[in-house]
Image (cartoon, rainbow, N blue to C red):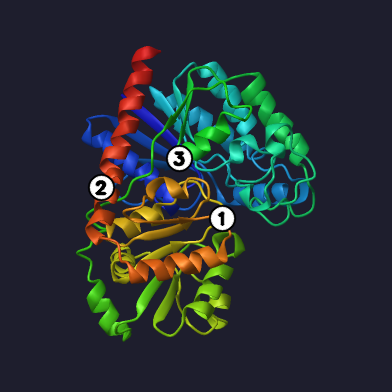
């Protein structure tokens, strides 16, 4: 069986790493895989093909900024991708993120409608059924259910349509190509039950939907990581460590709540944030130890293992792997009741706080300090998210769809 995966990047970022992990799972099962991607470079040892160009990405960025039509440019390189698909002749086509300044979705779905091949589309966010944004929880918008217009996020949220709100037209085009003219043999996958519920309220509701949770490497993220050694090197002594991790710290990821935690908790606590940009590192308030983003899994695992609690104060998210990474290192998780963030957290391994409840967040941290949870129970919860088990579910899905065609 030959599987072609399509994504913005290969091996970079969370979704890029997922494509590589799925490729390895296919190889272990004796199957073949090619990853077609639009930007950056692929890691060595992975069968991958970059069909996109830097020039085209720049043009697509301008197209998005000035016309607000993200996902409706890059016709030439989308044609090149389609030619490559025909040449490779896969048994199954697996789509990941189609946004990211590299693809003409109308042209792509026109081809898939004619190709007659099984298609899997993993929705890593909500962009597929909105007129602009990847998430809308932060502003409480529900226009995606009936028809986007007058988007409150078109300038402030990715993909940043800075000079024109085209959300109404984008929504109608997506609904037309996916809802009113369905793609045959297409199955949707969501990493969370929360996102599956949203899909069933959208114009994608007629497609079959499955939940396949994200997974992590339980060998890399483990209580065996040298957290105590890191604590000694940082001179943190007996402080109760509250950890937060994000790729980009902004209001929707909960940065202001960590500022409040540092202000309210007292000197016996230490807030540590990983993933801060230069500006935030320069202007950190008292009580917060900040670090830039790290690409070292070993270093990140040591911070998780050192922490007494991991706090995920995000105001919108799908199924964050940071929760899983913390649990795998034996660290309990406190999360806002946001999206699919709650789905990996139970009473034995953490606490769920109402979204945006600052006092509830502070209370939960203090409660876990006074009544610590079992680190072994946290690790046991993480065992449900072994990436090798999760990504084998994709291999089984591919085989099922190929046999049923």
**Considering only vertical position in the picture, is 52 above or below 110?**
below
Q: Few, some or many C-alpha atoms within 10 Å of disc 2 (few <14, some 14-19, many ≥20)?
A: some
Give the Cα separation between the discs numbered 2 and 1.
27 Å
The answer to the question of whether label 1 and label 3 lie on touching residues, with beta carbons closer than 8 A, is no
Q: Which residue in the rendered view is the most extreme toward the left?
A: 224
Q: Secondary structure at mark 1?
A: loop
Q: Which mark is residue 383?
A: 2
Q: Earlier in the sequence, mark 3 or mark 2?
A: 3
Give the mark, 2 or 1, whose residue is nearer the N terminus. Answer: 1
> Can residue 243 be seen at all in this image of the molecule?
no
Q: Quadrant of the N terminus?
A: top left
135 lies above or below 351: above
Compare residues 363 and 17 and report the one nearer the observer: 363
Where is residue 137 shown, x and y percent of the image?
62, 48
Q: Nearer the viewer, mark 2 or mark 1?
A: 1
Q: CA distance from mark 3 to mark 2?
A: 17 Å
C-alpha span from label 1 to label 3: 18 Å
Q: Residue at x 59, y 27 (%)?
A: 204
**In the rendered image, the vertical position of residue 268 relative to residue 380, given as above or below:** below
Within 10 Å of the Cα at label 3, are there few (<14), some (14-19), or many (20+) other Cα atoms?
many
Quarter of the figure with residue 333? bottom left
Q: Position of residue 103 (x, y in %)?
A: 59, 39
The residue beneath circle 1 is 355
Residues at discs 3 and 2 in contact (Cβ within 8 Å): no
From the viewer's perspective, is 317 left or right of 32? right
Numbered disc 2: secondary structure = helix
User: Residue drawn at (71%, 34%), measured in percent from left and top?
Assistant: 171
Q: Position of residue 197 (x, y in %)?
A: 53, 33
Question: Which dot, 1 or 3, sits closer to the camera?
Answer: 1
Reading the image, the residue beneath label 3 is 192
């Amino acid at each position: 069986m030959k599987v072609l995966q399509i994504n913005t990047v290969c091996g970079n970022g969370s979704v890029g790493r997922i494509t590589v992990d799925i490729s390895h799972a296919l190889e272990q099962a004796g199957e073949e895989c090619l990853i077609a991607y639009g930007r950056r470079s692929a890691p060595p040892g992975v069968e991958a093909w970059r069909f996109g160009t830097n020039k085209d990405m720049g043009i697509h960025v301008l197209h998005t900024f000035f016309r607000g039509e993200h996902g409706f440019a890059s016709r030439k390189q989308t044609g090149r991708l389609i030619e490559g698909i025909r040449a490779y002749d896969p048994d199954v086509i697996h789509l990941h993120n189609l946004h990211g300044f590299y693809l003409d979705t109308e042209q792509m779905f026109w081809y898939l409608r004619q190709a007659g091949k099984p298609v899997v589309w993993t929705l890593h966010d909500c962009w597929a059924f909105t007129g602009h944004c990847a998430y809308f929880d932060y502003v409480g918008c529900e226009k995606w259910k009936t028809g986007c217009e007058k988007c409150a996020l078109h300038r402030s949220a990715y993909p940043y349509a800075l000079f024109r709100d085209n959300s109404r037209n984008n929504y109608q085009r997506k609904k037309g190509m996916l809802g009113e003219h369905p793609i045959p043999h297409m199955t949707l996958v969501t990493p969370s039950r929360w996102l599956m519920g949203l899909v069933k309220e959208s114009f994608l509701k007629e497609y079959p939907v499955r939940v396949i949770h994200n997974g992590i490497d339980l060998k890399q993220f483990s209580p065996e990581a040298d957290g105590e050694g890191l604590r000694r090197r940082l001179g943190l002594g007996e402080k109760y460590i509250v950890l937060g991790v994000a790729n980009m710290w902004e209001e929707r990821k909960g940065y202001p709540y960590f500022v409040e935690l540092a202000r309210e908790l007292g000197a016996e606590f230490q807030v540590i944030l990983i993933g801060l940009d230069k500006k935030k590192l320069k202007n950190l308030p008292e009580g917060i130890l900040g670090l830039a983003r790290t690409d070292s899994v070993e270093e990140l695992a040591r911070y998780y293992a050192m922490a007494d609690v991991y706090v995920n104060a995000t105001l919108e998210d799908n199924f964050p792997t940071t929760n899983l990474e913390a649990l795998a290192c034996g660290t309990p998780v406190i999360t806002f009741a946001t999206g699919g963030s709650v789905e990996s957290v139970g009473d034995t391994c953490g606490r769920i706080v109402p979204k945006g409840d600052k006092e509830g967040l502070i209370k939960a941290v203090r409660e876990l300090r006074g009544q610590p949870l079992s680190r072994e129970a946290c690790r046991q919860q993480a065992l449900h998210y072994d990436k090798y088990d999760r990504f084998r579910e994709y291999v089984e899905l591919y085989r099922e769809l190929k046999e049923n065609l």
